Image (cartoon, grey):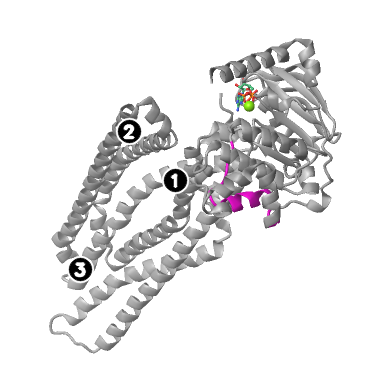
Amino acid sequence: MMTTAEKKKDSLPFFGIGKIIPYIRKYSKHLVLMVVCGILSGLFDIVMPLFQKYALNHYVGEKTLDTLGWFIALYAATGILVCIMTYISCSIAMATEVRVNRDLRNAAFDHLQTLSFSYFNQNSVGYIHARVMSDTSRIGSLSSWTLMDAIWHSTYFIGALVVMFLTNAKLAALVFLIVPFITVLFSFFQKHLVRVNREIRETNSKITGDFNEGITGAKTIKTLVIEETIRDELTKDTAEIKRKSVRAARLRGLFSATMNMASSVAIALVLWRGGYIAESEVGTFSMFMTYAEGLMEPVRWLIDVVSDLITTQVNIERFSKLVETKSDVSDSPEVIEKYGDTFHPKKENWEELKGDIRFEDVSFKYPDGDELVLEHFDLDIPYGSNIAIVGETGAGKSTLVNLVCRFYEPTSGKVLIDGRDARERSQLWLHSNIGYVLQSPHLFSGTIRENMLYGNLGASEEDIWRALKLVSADEVVNKLEKGLETDVGEGGNLLSTGEKQLICFARAILADPRILVLDEATASVDTITEQKIQAAIDTIIKGRTSLVIAHRLSTVRNADVILVVKDGKIIERGRHKELLRQRGHYYELYTRQYEDEATGKALA
Ligand SMILES: Nc1ncnc2c1ncn2[C@@H]1O[C@H](COP(=O)(O)OP(=O)(O)OP(=O)(O)O)[C@@H](O)[C@H]1O
Ligand SMILES: [Mg+2]
């Protein structure tokens, strides 16, 4: 059952606008000016028909033209003031829109950087992308244009009514006869339009999802030959959105037409009785007709804005959900106080990291997993040691190093770095001391040089080449026509997986980390390159703590300790020869691999 607090939170009042006030408050001075100009421009618009009334009453027929000079001057001045006010309020609205947009996007992006891995596992790229791009842009336009329109329309509406009643209450009351009619129409269309718009929005998200899958899974779609199935799904959704959009357009058209009719009715009423009531003052008569028509504009606007606000409420909710998401892994206020946060590190307080790692009775379950991956796990890695982790797929090897890197935190127990709980110091401190070559290598779009520099912004040309040479990645770079200036494409997709892996490796080394983590870092390179890298690893790891995960057991022979992991437990540990002598799981894995390789060679 929902608590009262939850219910309150669920039905956001005023379309949830309260949630974005902190982002708008900054611009309150601009907005006040915009509101004032909006009100003035609305007021001047009300004055215009008064001129019309005056001119018709005083200058048409055999009347005097004495005041004509003044009239023209005032009329022109009012016209110019309307222009100026409109210009100021529009430019403020435009500037506020882009400013709020920028602030929201920066806030969302900054917050994303602090979220843990599990957030990205649970939310698709498409979903996050929509939050950062389209939700923010709708909120931006709400806080500027919608606000300005609201001011202008209400000023006009209220002002016109006041002028009408002051000029001729009876005639104004006559125009008011159509109000009940408009109210009924409004609520009828409002209900239907909101529903159709919601359905369109839902289908639209489905289409975005279809597109995302179609793009990210393009290769898989081709290999599975399911183009037709995927297309059918998309065309079904696009047909649906077309049908619904046409319905919405018809509804809106019908509403517009009935509003036109309503204003015609109002004008007809004025024409019918106006003569008596206004005692044949043509000017008053004509002014009333202009107002009667103009009054429909705010009503027309209102119907659109209500559907818009309902959509924007969803945007606000989703955006707030993103920026309010608490990371599973976060630094405590005391830690931030001392070590700084992601964007304001207090490096002067950072201790040097030696590289002792200890797991103390660690149990771990992934935030979205059901079972414990590690249970009462203990492990001591003294600084400078070279640990190899082997085991079958899904044994928990990557999980183990993810915990070392504090990408996740233990469900219970502790991971100690240099004898202190990792949570006692900042994530950034730890991460800036770790070089991690991931199982799935990632490069940023840009050149190889730029990618290398992400490892160490201050690295010289010489440092870059030394790092590249160390892992035989220099050959990859030399082979490319543009060398270090080669563009690697989004995610590094213009290079092969092995090439990407080598460059990621070199990048990690360039950072000169205290702890080096290699998760299958050589899985995608050929045996000759692997041997070269192996030699490099032997050099690089000296004086550092290293954790090397490898499927190919031939690469871990030199490790100080090999940990054999199975179902989240270390079932064997020791040096290569000792483990072989034990004739346990490692021996089994090794001989099986060795046999496979021997058979492979023989067949070749
Ligand atoms: N993000 C996740 N959410 C939930 N469960 C996960 C997640 N990542 C891994 N697991 C589960 O945790 C277990 C250990 O996974 P892990 O990635 O550590 O295996 P691994 O030993 O690195 O395997 P491989 O050799 O295939 O890389 C697996 O059973 C897996 O299903
Ligand atoms: Mg793994």
Residue nearest the observer in this picture, 152 or 229:
229
The residue at 13%/84% (across/down) is 62
On residue 312, the disc is: 1
Q: Mainly helix, strand or loop, the magenta region?
A: loop
Position above or below: 555 against 275:
above
> How far, Cα to Cα, is label 3 from label 1?
40 Å
Q: Secondary structure at mark 2?
A: helix
Badge 3 residue CB within 8 Å of ligand 1: no
Residue nearest the observer in this picture, 14 or 499:
499
Residue range (magenta): 441-460
Q: Which residue is mark 2?
A: 234
Residue 312: give x, y in percent of width and height.
44, 45
The residue at 72%/38% (across/down) is 536
Q: Amino acid at mark 3?
A: Ser
Quarter of the figure with the C terminus:
top right
Q: Amino acid at mark 2?
A: Leu
Whether residue 155 sits left or right of residue 503 in the image: it is left
Residue 384: give x, y in percent of width and height.
83, 35
> How far, Cα to Cα, is label 3 from label 2?
54 Å
Are there few (<14), some (14-19), or many (20+) residues within 10 Å of tag 2? some
Position above or below: 437 against 462:
above
- Write down which quadrant ligand 2 falls in: top right
The residue at 72%/13% (across/down) is 587
Q: Which tag is nearer the camera, tag 3 or tag 1?
A: 1
Mark 3 and mark 1 lie on one chain; the one further toward the N terminus is 3
Are there few (<14), some (14-19), or many (20+) residues within 10 Å of tag 1? many
Are there few (<14), some (14-19), or many (20+) residues within 10 Å of tag 3? many
On residue 286, the disc is: 3
Whether residue 81 sits left or right of residue 444 in the image: it is left
